[in-house]
Amino acid sequence: MPQSPGVYLFLNDKGVILYVGKAKNLKNRVSSYFANKNSLLGKTYQLVGQVKKIRIIQVESEIEALLLEANLIKKYAPKYNIRMTDGKAYPLIRITNKSLYPSVLTARRFDDPKSLYFGPFPNVTAMREVLRLIRRIFPYQSVPNHPKRTCLYHHLGLCPCLPVFPSDNYQKQYKKTLKHIIDFLDGKTAKVIADLEKEREEASKNEAFEKAAHIQKQIDHINYVTHPVHTPFEYETNPNLKGELRMQEMLSLQQVLSAENIHIDLPRRIECYDNSNFQGTNPTSSMVVLTNGEIDKSQYRKFKVKTVKGPNDFASMQEILTRRLKHREWPLPQLFIVDGGKGQVSAVKEVFDTLGVTIPLIGLAKREETIITSDLQEISLPKNSPALQLMMRIRDEAHRFAITFHRKLRSKAAFT
């Protein structure tokens, strides 16, 4: 089974669906039922004893897994999903309609006709996971009557504490936040991102660069959690949707590069590199790999930058690619990608020319998501381009992996 997000269905010997579950990692979650069956309790033990077949549907993100799980439970009403709710009503997300201080709450019933409700969700854990993901991006008030003092969640950046900051601008901003949350829960993530991009541009024009940077972080988080988003209906009608999307992305990238006279076989293996440092300290680099369009964590590598002093991104890229190419036991990719623009691409091209490497090399410049070829030509693609989506996914993953390793080294250094 794949180590990726998705939904699994347990069926009995007659093909009847007994249970539907979701997982961040399908292989780990499903195998946990069978690794030590005797340790299972009660209804779960009974369930596993009847399982004769397992179906899986891979999805793009945790949010999609949650929504698809809810949809399938509602559609099939599996015996053991119903039993495990212990007769309780499915949980809901409720957004109150108080004019001054609306709140995002949880509920079990549609009791207030003035409130907005979303759901139902298959269980409380699933619903709280959705809320947790949303709250990191869009801080909201989570109690119906907030006291007139700052709360712990405010200090964590998760609550606006509206009664403490009653200015008109603050209220106006919170209304925008609630609108984004409502659109997000409605599945309109493209609209949320478009609205945020408008806000970011407006902030930049007004030279409110700190605000613009904060909005960009919100966009990045949404892209990381949900990009691209497909409806449960699409996955139900085509359980192989994810595999087909991956093939479409690879073919699209092949065609885009071919139009620029960069000819590659279908890129079955792609490597992407990103550097991370803080004021030149503990510089690190990451190598992230896509195999057949899928994130392949077993192939990831992390590097400590050894020869470069200070924050020199170009020299760091040169060192890391030189070291990587000495590992002849590692399979070579059909394509190298670096996070950065013309400077980073030129630096790595020097290494390739010195070592006689002819594998295609491109960069992805973050500000406008522009592709930079090894001869420093620029390629601009629409945001919905499958080729660009593939590149952004691997670039964002390389960035995340590099930062995680860098933070770990900084923590070690501080402790020492």
Image (spheres, rainbow, N blue to C red):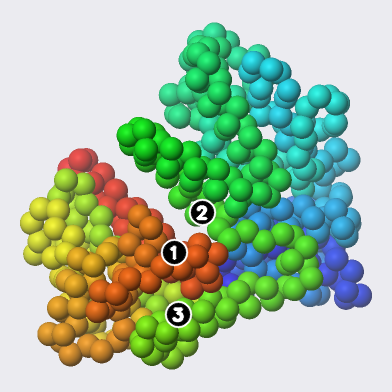
The residue that appears at 57% across and 32% down in the rendered structure is 177
Which of discs 2 and 3 lies nearer the camera? The answer is 3
Q: Position of residue 249 (x, y in %)?
A: 53, 76
Which of discs 3 and 1 lies nearer the camera? The answer is 3
For residue 169, the mark is: none
Mark 3 highlights which residue? 256
Mark 1 highlights which residue? 392
The residue that appears at 73% across and 35% down in the rendered structure is 93
Judging depth in this view, the residue of 247 and 288 nearest the camera is 247
Could you say whether the residue bearing mark 1 is in a helix, strand or loop?
helix
Whether the residues at callouts 2 and 1 have beta carbons within 8 Å, the answer is yes
Judging depth in this view, the residue of 37 and 397 nearest the camera is 397
Q: Left of 409 or right of it: where is 399?
A: right
Q: Position of residue 398 (x, y in %)?
A: 36, 63
Could you say whether the residue bearing mark 3 is in a helix, strand or loop?
helix
Residue lying furthest right: 14
Q: Left of 264 or right of it: where is 43?
A: right
- Crowding at label 1, few (<14), some or many (≥20) Cα neighbours within 10 Å? many
- Crowding at label 3, few (<14), some or many (≥20) Cα neighbours within 10 Å? some
Q: Amino acid at mark 2?
A: Asn
Q: Amino acid at mark 1?
A: Met
- Crowding at label 2, few (<14), some or many (≥20) Cα neighbours within 10 Å? some
Q: Amino acid at mark 3?
A: Val
The residue that appears at 42% across and 86% down in the rendered structure is 258
The residue that appears at 81% across and 59% down in the rendered structure is 72
Mark 2 highlights which residue? 223
Say if 187 sits above or below 78 in the image: above
- For the C terminus, the quadrant is top left
Residue lying furthest front: 205
Give the image quarter of residue 85: top right
What is the C-alpha distance between the residues marked 2 and 1? 9 Å
